[in-house]
Image: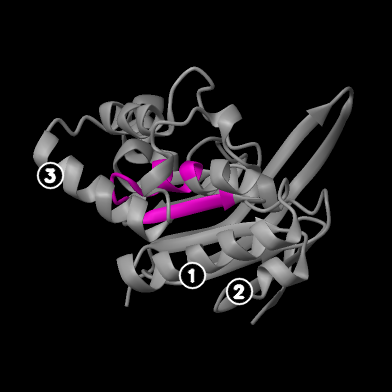
Amino acid sequence: MSAILQTENLVMTYRVGKVDVQALRGVNMSIAPGEFVSIMGPSGCGKSTLLHILGGLLKPTRGTVIVDGEDLAAMTDAARTDLRRRKIGFVFQRFNLFPTLTAEGNLRLAEHIHGNGKRTSNDKTRHEVLKLLRLENKMSHKPLELSGGEQQRVAIARAIINRPAIILADEPTGNLDSENSEIVLNMLQQLNRELKQTIVIITHNPEAAAVAARIIEMRDGVIVKDH
């Protein structure tokens, strides 16, 4: 089976003052469709940089990034934006919900950005997603009226509402207590099983990483273990 995410000799160098700092130093990685993968390592190991490059949010200094058969390096900025819209859902540590919109409003905005105007099919998909994430009774609430765990579940719903092939999650439990962390991680597992989406999370927490079927460990900009 061909990879849905693949990197070859991936290098990312930042200029900090007069010094070049290598965040990634030749990363080679392949992830198959439908895999649930954790990328784990301490702060500063390069895992966030790698995730942002996989999502087309950063352009690497050197190397190849293939996303579902498309070469990010060969794309224009507009083409990378279109790929993200079509194929990738993002979940961030800080939720990034619009505070003036209800939970439903945040989901409808994601649908609008995606460009899906088929209202009836959207309503059916939205109901399925909300039921899966136990959010049916929270749709009229604004973010400040929700707990941290509920806000993250809305953020996950927003990421998957348009059924992207890939979900990239950046420390999805970083702002949650242990109980809500467990709920969110279990739901990501369920989404992976039921919707067959490829899920990649980055974390420094071994307990969070352990929910994935595969763990990639990073140190100092390189992969040191893949199991």
Residue type, label 2: Val
**Image quadrant for the N terminus?**
bottom left
Residue, disc 2 = 211
Residue depicted at x 75% and y 46%: 23
| Residue 71 in sight here | no
The number of numbered badges drawn on the structure is: 3
Q: Which mark is residue 121?
A: 3
Residue, disc 1 = 189
Q: Which mark is residue 49?
A: none
Assess whether mark 1 and mark 2 are in contact (beta carbons under 8 angstroms).
yes
Q: Is residue 67 above or below residue 58?
A: below
- Mark 1 and mark 3: Cα distance apart in space: 25 Å
Badge 2 or badge 1: first in the primary sequence = 1
Residue type, label 3: Ser
Callout 2 secondary element: loop
The image position of residue 200, as x and y in percent, is 53, 60
Seen from the viewer's position, the closer of residues 64 and 122 is: 122
Residue depicted at x 34% and y 26%: 109
Badge 3 or badge 2: first in the primary sequence = 3
Assess whether mark 2 and mark 3 are in contact (beta carbons under 8 angstroms).
no
Badge 1 or badge 3: first in the primary sequence = 3
